[in-house]
């Protein structure tokens, strides 16, 4: 048996807080665990399977949830980004993306052979991506060559900043430039609709923010892009090329579908999550651990600067690993081993007792070392 050390820990790793399975998804995982299990009644393509009801999920539930015309399942947020980029890329063309973008956005662009222009953030301490800067970089990049796509990370995975995506969408529209919203940390956590933003594409990550086992993601778009991004094979007439015919086909999809009703409900409680995160951040600041990024913060992913813990690490017996070890002793996991001065964490889905317990742990750790 492969044992998972951290199974019963309080996990505050931002990667993990939104991907925990619901009870329904746990059942689905066992029920559909056999390889190609969902393909028993396939008539030619994944999203057209009626039993289990993949068709209804992809063609009714998902577009409604994402506020888009057309939706598809992908193998992850990055595969969704890559599909869009690869479909729009032409020789010697450019993509403009925010400087807070995830590595997988950059790598997707490289794989699609796009040149990348980055919109810099405002730097310490907030690291904001400003809409005006976006406009500037688009204009500069147009002098270098054809820009085929813009991308904004909403929120980014480092600071949890939520840029003014509507304004960025307006700028892109005025420049006749399609906009892709990377909602890996938004879709399934907070309410977000493509049509309300006014962008062209949206991607989400099932294993990160939609309580799914994964790897799985979602892709939504405006109808006008269907023929380009979902272009079909010349030989296999119903297979979409950018999706390599069919994507997540098995237990990962069934966990996404099983969790979906709960996910739909939980996004309505987003205000509570933001409130919890803000309270957590302000208590951390009382301990001398400062929240960087957008302030007041609007997301459960938070980035902290802890000079006080860094100072302790210089003298502690375990050096820079002291924090990880102290948290582990208290069954708290999620801050990378070796980090003390800067780290990110997430309070998403934590019960109030758990939030208090984590705060208490930081307090005790600081007090214990202050004495030595
Ligand atoms: C995690 C993350 C991704 C990658 O998501 P996958 O579904 O694993 O491909 C992309 N962008 C951001 C901002 C992320 O945080």
Image (cartoon, grey):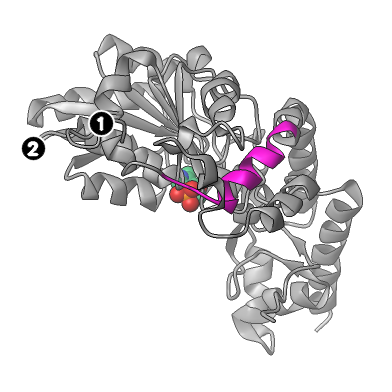
Q: Which secondary structure type mostly characterizes the magenta part of the structure? A: helix
Task: Identify the residue under disc 1.
Answer: 237
Q: Secondary structure at mark 1?
A: loop
Residue range corresponding to the magenta coloring: 247-261
Percent x, y of residue 58: 53, 28
Percent x, y of residue 360: 87, 61
Percent x, y of residue 159: 54, 45
Residue depicted at 67% across the width and 64% down the height: 334
Disc 2/disc 1 C-alpha distance (Å): 30 Å
Does 63 appear in magenta?
A: no
Which mark is in front, 2 or 1?
1
Numbered badge on residue 92: 2
Q: Is residue 187 left or right of residue 81?
A: right
Q: Residue furthest right?
A: 353
Work out which quarter of the rendered image holds the N terminus and state it. bottom right
Q: Residues within 10 Å of mark 1 (few under 14, many from 20)?
A: few
Residue depicted at 9% across the width and 29% down the height: 145
Q: Is residue 119 above or below residue 330?
A: above
């Amino acid at each position: 048996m492969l044992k998972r050390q951290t199974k019963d820990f309080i996990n505050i790793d931002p990667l993990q807080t939104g991907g925990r399975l619901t009870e329904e998804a746990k059942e689905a995982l066992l029920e559909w665990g056999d390889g190609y299990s969902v393909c028993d009644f396939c008539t030619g393509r994944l999203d057209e399977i009626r039993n289990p009801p993949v068709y209804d999920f992809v063609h009714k539930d998902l577009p409604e949830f994402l506020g888009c015309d057309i939706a598809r399942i992908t193998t992850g947020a990055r595969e969704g980004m890559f599909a869009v980029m690869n479909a729009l890329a032409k020789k010697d063309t450019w993509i403009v993306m925010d400087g807070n973008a995830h590595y997988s956005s950059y790598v997707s662009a490289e794989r699609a052979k796009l040149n990348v222009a980055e919109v810099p953030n405002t730097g310490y301490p907030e690291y904001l991506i400003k809409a005006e800067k976006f406009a500037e970089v688009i204009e500069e990049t147009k002098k270098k060559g054809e820009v085929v796509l813009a991308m904004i990370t909403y929120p980014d995975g480092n600071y949890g900043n939520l840029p003014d995506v509507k304004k960025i969408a307006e700028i892109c529209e005025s420049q006749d430039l399609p906009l892709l919203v990377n909602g890996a940390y938004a879709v399934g956590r907070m309410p977000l609709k493509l049509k309300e933003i006014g962008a062209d594409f949206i991607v989400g990550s099932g294993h990160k923010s939609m309580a799914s086992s994964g790897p799985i993601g979602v892709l939504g778009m405006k109808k006008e892009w269907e023929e380009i991004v979902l272009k079909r094979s010349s030989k296999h007439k119903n297979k979409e090329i950018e999706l390599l015919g069919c994507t997540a086909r098995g237990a990962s999809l069934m966990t996404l579908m099983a969790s979906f009703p709960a996910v739909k409900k939980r996004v309505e409680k987003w205000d509570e999550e933001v409130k919890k995160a803000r309270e957590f951040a302000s208590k951390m600041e009382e301990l001398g651990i400062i929240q960087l990024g957008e302030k007041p913060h609007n997301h459960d992913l938070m980035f902290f600067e802890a000079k006080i813990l860094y100072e302790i690490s210089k003298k502690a017996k375990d050096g820079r690993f002291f924090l990880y070890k102290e948290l582990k002793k208290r069954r708290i996991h999620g801050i990378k081993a070796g980090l003390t001065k800067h780290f990110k964490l997430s309070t998403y889905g934590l019960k109030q007792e758990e939030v208090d317990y984590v705060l208490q742990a930081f307090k005790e750790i600081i007090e214990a070392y202050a004495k030595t």
